[in-house]
Image (tube, rainbow, N blue to C red):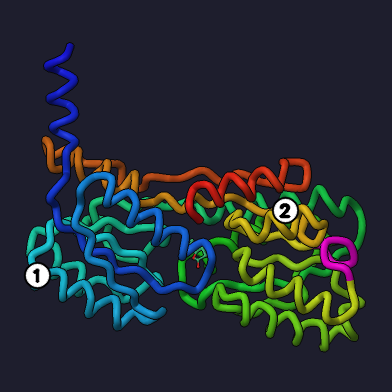
């Protein structure tokens, strides 16, 4: 047993590997958490992580990937800002026999261009948020304003679709306005201000659905500035489960969030370790959990728990 165990451990050892990470940027609290968890996971495994921040630009990501290929890294982690336009550069990585693992967002490209994608089921996330709203409003008329994520990104496309699926058939619930807030707090606030203005100070708005917590936090500020009570006058539901949304939920200013783990790198490194050990092909999609949290789920405790994890 001891021998079997130690050889299994040895087989999983990826210390000394050089892995490039093309990160999107730092648009959200969740993104910052993912970056820090990835660094921690790399350090714990003795991986030399080459980190490149693309400042939200696909062209910067493409450049970074070409740089990693030129350096001859052992693998590449890519969090793709948008879903399309990756085929050429991923074919270059394949040509160089460098495995690519997608983190947290999907792409529209042949699946053989990447080893695996570690991500949530983003349609499900939207559905969970929508189902919460369906429950919460019952038969009441409800006009929803939607803050979309980055245009062309897989979470913006899929979270919209999932939410629409959940409210389909509930004719009392209507999305009346929908715009991108680019996953940022400042744009979330700005777009919410415009929504409030165009509805006579928010009179007709029953709920805001934000594709991430940061935009929800921005929207909460705009609702307060307009003299309304977020969480009560206007319900707030979003996705990510970052510490700040738990502060808002604990204060009654947000109602629900869907958890997205920032630890995409752990499963990615495990998949690479098995692949390097004996050629094990991982599942094409390694899907993380999508759990709903409301005021009933100990928001103060959830806040603390995340702070302890290094968010
Ligand atoms: O929900 C959002 C971030 O790509 C799924 O990107 C991720 C999203 C996350 O900026 O906060």
Q: Are marks 1 and 2 in contact (CB under 8 Å)?
A: no
Considering the numbered disc 1 on the image, is that residue within a helix, a strand or a loop? helix
> Which corner quadrant of the image does residue 71 belong to?
bottom left
Point 46% across, 65% down: residue? 32
Mark 1 vs mark 2: give the one in front. 1
- For residue 281, above or below residue 158: above
Q: Is residue 151 magenta?
A: no
- Look at 75% across and 68% down and name the residue there: 208
Q: Secondary structure at mark 2?
A: strand
Q: Is residue 232 magenta?
A: yes
Principal secondary structure, stretch drawn in magenta: loop
Quarter the N terminus occupies: top left
Disc 1 crowd rating (10 Å Cα; few below 14, some 14-19, many 20+) is few
In the rendered view, would you say 14 is above or below 21? above
Range of magenta residues: 229-235
User: Horizontal placement of 70 versus 256: left or right?
Assistant: left
On residue 256, the disc is 2
Q: Mark 1 or mark 2: name the one nearer the start of the chain.
A: 1
How far separated are the C-alphas under marks 1 and 2? 44 Å
């Amino acid at each position: 047993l001891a021998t079997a165990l130690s050889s299994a451990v040895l087989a999983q050892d990826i210390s000394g590997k050089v892995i490039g990470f093309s990160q999107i940027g730092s648009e959200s609290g969740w993104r910052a958490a993912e970056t820090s968890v990835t660094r921690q996971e790399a350090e714990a495994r003795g991986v030399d992580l080459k980190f490149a921040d693309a400042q939200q630009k696909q062209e910067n990501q493409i450049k970074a990937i070409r740089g990693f290929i030129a350096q001859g890294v052992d693998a590449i982690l890519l969090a793709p800002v948008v879903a399309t336009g990756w085929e050429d550069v991923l074919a270059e990585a394949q040509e160089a026999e460098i495995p690519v693992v997608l983190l947290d967002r999907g792409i529209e490209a042949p699946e053989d261009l990447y080893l695996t994608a570690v991500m949530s089921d983003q349609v499900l996330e939207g559905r969970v948020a929508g189902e919460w709203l369906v429950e919460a409003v019952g038969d009441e008329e409800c006009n929803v304003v939607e803050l979309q994520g980055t245009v062309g990104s897989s979470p913006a496309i899929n979270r919209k679709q999932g939410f629409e699926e959940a409210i389909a058939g509930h004719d009392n619930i209507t999305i009346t306005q929908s715009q991108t807030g680019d996953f940022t707090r400042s744009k979330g606030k700005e777009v919410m201000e415009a929504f409030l203005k165009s509805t006579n100070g928010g009179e007709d708005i029953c709920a805001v659905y934000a594709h991430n917590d940061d935009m929800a936090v921005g929207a909460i500020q705009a609702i307060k500035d307009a003299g309304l009570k977020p969480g009560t006058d206007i319900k707030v539901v979003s996705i990510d489960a970052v510490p700040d949304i738990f502060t808002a939920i604990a204060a009654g200013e947000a109602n629900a969030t869907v958890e997205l783990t920032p630890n995409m790198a752990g499963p990615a490194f495990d998949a690479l370790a098995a692949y390097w050990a004996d050629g094990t092909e991982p599942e094409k999609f390694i899907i993380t959990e999508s759990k709903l949290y409301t005021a009933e789920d100990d928001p103060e405790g959830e806040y603390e728990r995340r702070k302890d994890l290094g968010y």
